[in-house]
Image (cartoon, rainbow, N blue to C red):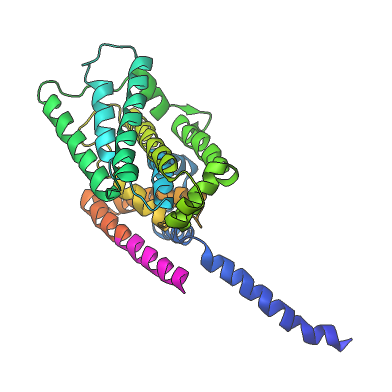
Amino acid sequence: MTQPTADFPMVATPRREAIVARLLALPISYFGTLALLACAGLLRPNLLQPFLLLLILRQTAPLGVAVLGQSLCVRLLSIDLSYGGVAMAVSYIMTSGYLPLSEPALILICLLFGVAVGATNAFFIARLNASSVIVTLAMALILGGVVTAFSQLRAPGDAPAFLRYVGQVRIGILPIAVLVWCALLVPVAAFLRTSTFGRYVEAIGASPRAALASGIPYVRVVFLAHVLSSLFAVVSAFLILGFVGVGSLSIGADLALNSLAAVILGGVSFGSDRGGALGPSVAGFMLMFCFNLLTSFGLGEPGKQMAQGAIIALAAVAYAVRGGKQEK
């Protein structure tokens, strides 16, 4: 009768070690979010009211959509820094009045514009083997310059009524923007997990040379990933524009860096997708909650900028540490 009692610690210890190992393998975003919620509960409990949490979720929705595209590129050892330029261009197309078309036609033009931007990025990256950082950053600068030049002739105006409805109205207690985010997140996560394209992405991220040698269509996969990334950037710009209600040349200016930080903090590093689709999404909420918490302390825009720099640095450290562990 004493044998089971003696063996119990020997069985329980490996089980506890396995649980601890699984917890430590979770993305940083989970622990960061819990820490911020605990901090808010102690210092700013009003932020934990359901109404304010849903408001923060609505603010997170544009970043969450952008994170879907950025994580797809990062899984393929690429990156997309053109989000700011895409958002600026979409804002101008939708609000300037240069194109006297209906709202559905303008939305379609913006989506086609996103396809064109993604295809151009993919051509230089996949076909010409150019650096994704240089290509997409150059695209952002070019788009920003073009929009700035046109804005000197005609300034951006009010957002279309449909986008304001999507960005500001709720269905019950849930903002429509959050529902749009979830409607994209769930199918994308399922598609990457179950489809052949998802397996191709995983194989290319693990080893591009081995993927090419095995006959995986590297160019087509990278091409499609960057096109999807730009389309997600367009949808993200729609949500930002609908929430703000007015076109601006600064819309989406920090979208690229915030999405990249959220992706890495969410457990998706270059060539690895341990965080899946949920980890980066949680990281996006963590960023927005952090910015709101800083605002509640009265730090405002300077505090937000300092937090952004610190978070991006933390993301870089997390990527370096994760990469070191993978090498071992």
The percent coordinates of residue 10 (x first, y second) are 72, 83
The residue closer to the viewer here, 204 or 274, is 204
What secondary structure prevails in the magenta region? helix
Residue 126: quadrant of the picture: top left
- The reply to whether the magenta stretch includes residue 294 is no
- The reply to whether the magenta stretch includes residue 321 is yes
Q: Residue at horizontal 46%, vertical 60%? A: 38
The percent coordinates of residue 43 (x first, y second) are 39, 59
The residue closer to the viewer here, 322 or 60, is 322
186 with respect to 121 (left or right)? right
Give the answer, above or below, for where 240 lies relative to 31.
above
The percent coordinates of residue 83 (x first, y second) are 30, 40
Q: In the rendered image, is residue 58 in sight? A: no
Residue 84: quadrant of the picture: top left
Q: Residue furthest left?
A: 152
Give the answer, above or below, for where 101 lies relative to 324.
above
Identify the image quadrant of the N terminus.
bottom right
Task: Point out the stretch of residues depicted in magenta.
Answer: 313-328
Residue 67: quadrant of the picture: top left
Q: In the rendered image, is residue 234 in sight? A: yes
Q: Residue at horizontal 26%, vertical 57%? A: 309
153 with respect to 195 (left or right)? left
Give the answer, above or below, for where 146 lies relative to 1.
above
| Tag count | 0
The percent coordinates of residue 77 (x first, y second) are 38, 53
